[in-house]
Amino acid sequence: MTNYIIRSIFRTLVIMFLVMTIVFFVIRLGPYDPTTLMLGDYVEESKIVQLKQTLGLDQPLYTQYFRFLVQMAHLNLGDSYYSGESVVNLLGDVMPSTLDLLVASLLVGLVLGVVPGILAATRPNSIFDHILRLGTLVGISIPEFVIGLFLIALFALELSWFPAIGGSGSDGFQERLSYLVLPAFSIGIGMMAGIARLTRAAMLEILSKNYIETARAKGVKEVMVVLKHGFRNALLPLVTYLGILINYLLGAAVIVEIVFTRPGVGRLIVDAIKNADFPVVQLVLMFYAGAVVLVNLLVDIAYCFADPRIAYK
Amino acid sequence: MLFVALLVAAFAPVLVTHDPLAVNPAEKLETSSAKHFLGTDFWGRDIYSRILFGARYSLLIGFSAIGISMIVGLIVGTIAGYYANTGIAAVIVWITDILMCFPTLILGAMVAMVFGPGLFNTIIAIGIAFLPRFIRLARGNALSIKEELFIKAAQSIGMSTWRLFTVHLIPNVISPLLVMAIIWTSIAIITEVGLSFLGLGVPPPTASWGNILLDNLRYFRMRPAHVIWPSIAIAFTVQALNLIGDRFRDILDPKMR
């Protein structure tokens, strides 16, 4: 078991390193030149050359890469070209907001998805079931920002229940929460459809199994049968789905952050791309890749706990 | 319902030629629904026409990107599956794994950053973003198909690799790819909308759905309809594609048994 975990972790590290390298080269191959963007179009050649020298951009790529590696070894991740601040600081400022959103959305999606999923499975072919299936079909199609805009229109503008824009730093917990509601629901509803579908399908299959019948015959209460025996087995595909879901979640978070004008990692990277702010882009891309890889790693590890047979492959 | 959705999604390109193609008429400011069915935006451009034009672009980008991605992914994936334990397969798998690390939108943004904005570049960007999915799918299928008896038979009679691929392998690997291609087209369209919305896709004066959303987002309080209508268009198309894809999946699955 530990062997499996160690191998997984090692793979992850190697992948992260390759990702870092590729990201480094890829963004520097593009037509965006940070110096022109920083200094504007009407400045003389000499200033541009000077700036390039300061930033070290005039060196051949492999030299730059080498310096980058050395820098990384000293745990210095660089400063933003645009604002001069340490990249880590920039990310740190903005991270809590995004994390809030991610966690909240995930919670909303899970709760709203799993509960109807289980309910629909326990009442197959009922009116509830049909509504759910229809709902998921619709829910999967509507892009999250559409939902977001709609929610804004309804709850923020018309009814003024929740604020539409903003959601900075750490005002009191209550404040932050109210800023979170609409964005989290925008993403959550998008995820809900997929999760509900999956839960329902998994539960349907599981509830027809022998051991469920045994549990019922034993006299276990129906609620316990469904939850403890049934749902626990459904957790496995659900967790796998989470690995895929994080992909969607991160992308959606970017868009929702812009729609709701929330500070966040998404906005940070979009601005950085427009400004050709290489260090920022690099770090944020690695953050994204890292998040996806990390979640998948956790999923892999959880898998091997849930189904020990896997570890022996 | 499936057919209706299909028709509407297909009609859009046709309907476009029907209407005021003038995407930049005289600079009227934001008026709402009158002679212009859905109103005009800040620069006086007719929203309705823009949405219809946008349909063209978004559909074009979606289909071409997925099309290219599917073809390349099919070939690469089948190669990776067939030559399973060799160096080249390992390289392909590594690259695919790395590409899969990034959320689709972010990957698209990254590629867009390399190639710059523009219609063609956006197609490439989205195509690359979906490539790993196709490769994975094709490889998986190829791996299982290559063990089949008829493949072994073909190999034993000394069939040339080229013929093996084109006549036997690829036609058998392709069906799940086709199904997923349709479903992923809907995601591709959403991704394109996302990219344009972020300013990284089709450049501004052109009307793509993402651009329309971006332009009108600022005036949302005043004219929410301007944002709602493109959103409905997007949702409708996506829904249509998903339905078609689901139906295809149902059709192909039991028959394949």
Image (cartoon, coloured by chain):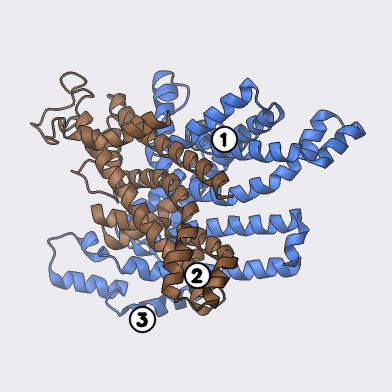
Residue B239, image x, y percentages: 42, 35
The quadrant holding residue A24 is: bottom left
Q: Residue furthest left?
A: B26
Q: Chain for mark 1? A: A
The answer to whether residue B140 is above or below residue A54 is: above
Q: Nearer the viewer, residue B39 or A276?
A: B39
Label 2 sits on what residue type?
Ala
Q: Position of residue A109 (x, y in %)?
A: 57, 37
Confirm whether residue A21 shows in the render. no
Label 1 – label 2 distance at C-alpha: 52 Å
The answer to whether any part of residue A72 appears in the image is: yes
**What amino acid is found at the position of numbered circle 1 in the picture?**
Phe
Residue at (54% x, 60% y) in the render:
B141
Task: Pinpoint the chain carrying mark 3.
Answer: A
- The chain to which mark 2 is attached is B
Q: Are marks 1 and 2 on the same chain?
A: no
Compared to residue A187, the image places residue B253 above or below, namely below
Q: Which residue is mark 3?
A: A63
| Residue topped by disc 2 | B80
Q: Which residue is mark 1?
A: A173
Q: Earlier in the sequence, mark 1 or mark 3?
A: 3
| Distance from Cα at disc 2 to Cα at disc 3 | 34 Å
| Disc number lying in front (2 or 3) | 2
- Residue shown at 79%/38% (left/top)? A228
**Chain identifier, brown in the render:** B
Q: Residue furthest right?
A: A218
Q: Nearer the viewer, residue A202 or B154?
A: B154
Q: Secondary structure at mark 2?
A: helix
